[in-house]
Amino acid sequence: IVAEIEKKITEAFEVFDRESNKTVDAREIGCIVRSMGCFPDEAEVQELLAKIEVEEPGGFVHLEKFLPVMTKVLLDRRFRPITEDVLLHAFEALDENKCGYITKEDLVKHLTEE
């Protein structure tokens, strides 16, 4: 099972490894973790980064440093998904017209302006 988890982590990491050199910008770690179904807040992402040896502040994260930390996160089932109630409440807050859907334009506006 550990080999499967490590494969999943490596695949997610490689999506963000634009140079194909087994490194990613440290600012991408939150996105990578969330792409694997874990939902840490920003403070928890910073805690993860503290456990990973980043070469310099704002630097790059190497896959070999990220892999053991993220494997433990997945094995321990940390950062569980947000509950349906919370997601529904967030959706309803964005659905200002109470029509049961959000237009692409409204979503873009909320994500970029508000």
Image (tube, rainbow, N blue to C red):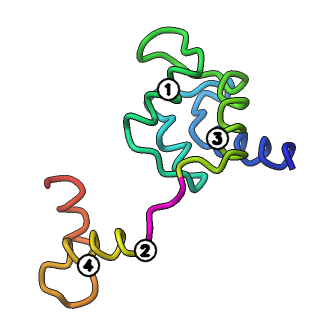
The residues bearing labels 2 and 4 have C-alpha atoms spaced at a distance of: 17 Å
The residue under the point 72% across, 39% down is: 10
Of 19 and 114, the residue lying toward us = 114
Residue picked out by circle 3: 73
Residue picked out by circle 4: 102
Q: Residues within 10 Å of mark 3 (few under 14, many from 20)?
A: some
The residues bearing labels 2 and 1 have C-alpha atoms spaced at a distance of: 31 Å
The residue under the point 23% across, 78% down is: 92
Mark 4 falls on what kind of element? loop
Q: Earlier in the sequence, mark 2 or mark 4?
A: 2
Q: Earlier in the sequence, mark 3 or mark 2?
A: 3
> In this picture, which residue range is highlighted in magenta?
80-84
The residues bearing labels 3 and 2 have C-alpha atoms spaced at a distance of: 22 Å
Q: Residues within 10 Å of mark 2 (few under 14, many from 20)?
A: few
Q: Earlier in the sequence, mark 4 or mark 1?
A: 1
Rendering coords of residue 82 (x, y %): 44, 62
Between marks 3 and 1 in the image, the one whose residue lies nearer the viewer:
3
Quadrant of image for the C terminus: bottom left
The quadrant holding residue 37 is: bottom right
Q: Are marks 3 and 1 in contact (CB under 8 Å)?
A: no
Query: Residue 111 magenta-drawn?
Result: no
